[in-house]
Image (spheres, grey):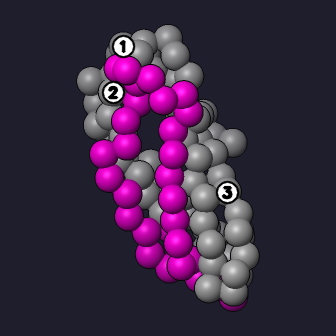
């Protein structure tokens, strides 16, 4: 799991490169992102995209001092299912 810092005023992309270690001869068919916890004023998902080898999420917001977990769940062309998490710590910078 990766830990990154984010300013509450920033809007940033975060990417998971699935091809580097996980796919070998497979490709991505589905990608879903979620954030935990869901709360008023918390981190929000503003957009997502993916290609055959990577996934990206655009997030904004968040309460200073809080930790949020971005979860990316994928399904591959061969029917494999997996997930990766990114921890976001919100800090005024």
Task: Say above or below: 32 vs 1.
Answer: below
Circle 1 is placed at which residue position? 92
Residues at marks 1 and 3, CA–CA distance in whole angstroms: 29 Å
- The quadrant of the rendering that contains the N terminus is top right
- SS assignment at label 3: strand
Which residue is drawn at the image coordinates 63% and 45% (left, top)? 85
- SS assignment at label 2: strand
Q: Residues within 10 Å of mark 1 (few under 14, many from 20)?
A: few
The disc at residue 83 is 3
Say which label, 1 or 2, has the lower sequence index. 2
Task: Say above or below: 45 vs 33.
Answer: above
Which residue is drawn at the image coordinates 69% and 86% (left, top)? 78
Q: Is residue 38 magenta?
A: yes
Q: Magenta segment range?
A: 25-54
Residues at marks 1 and 2, CA–CA distance in whole angstroms: 11 Å
Q: Is residue 11 visible?
A: yes
Q: Is residue 57 magenta?
A: no
Q: Is residue 6 visible?
A: no
Which quadrant holds residue 21?
bottom right
């Amino acid at each position: 799991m990766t830990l990154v810092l984010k300013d509450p005023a920033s809007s940033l992309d975060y990417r998971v490169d699935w091809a580097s270690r996980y796919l070998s001869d497979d490709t991505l068919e589905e990608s879903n992102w979620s954030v935990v916890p869901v709360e008023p004023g918390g981190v929000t998902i503003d957009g997502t995209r993916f290609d055959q080898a990577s996934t990206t999420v655009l997030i904004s917001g968040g309460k200073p001092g809080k930790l949020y977990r971005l979860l990316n769940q994928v399904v591959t062309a061969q029917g494999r299912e997996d997930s990766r998490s990114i921890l976001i710590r919100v800090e005024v910078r």
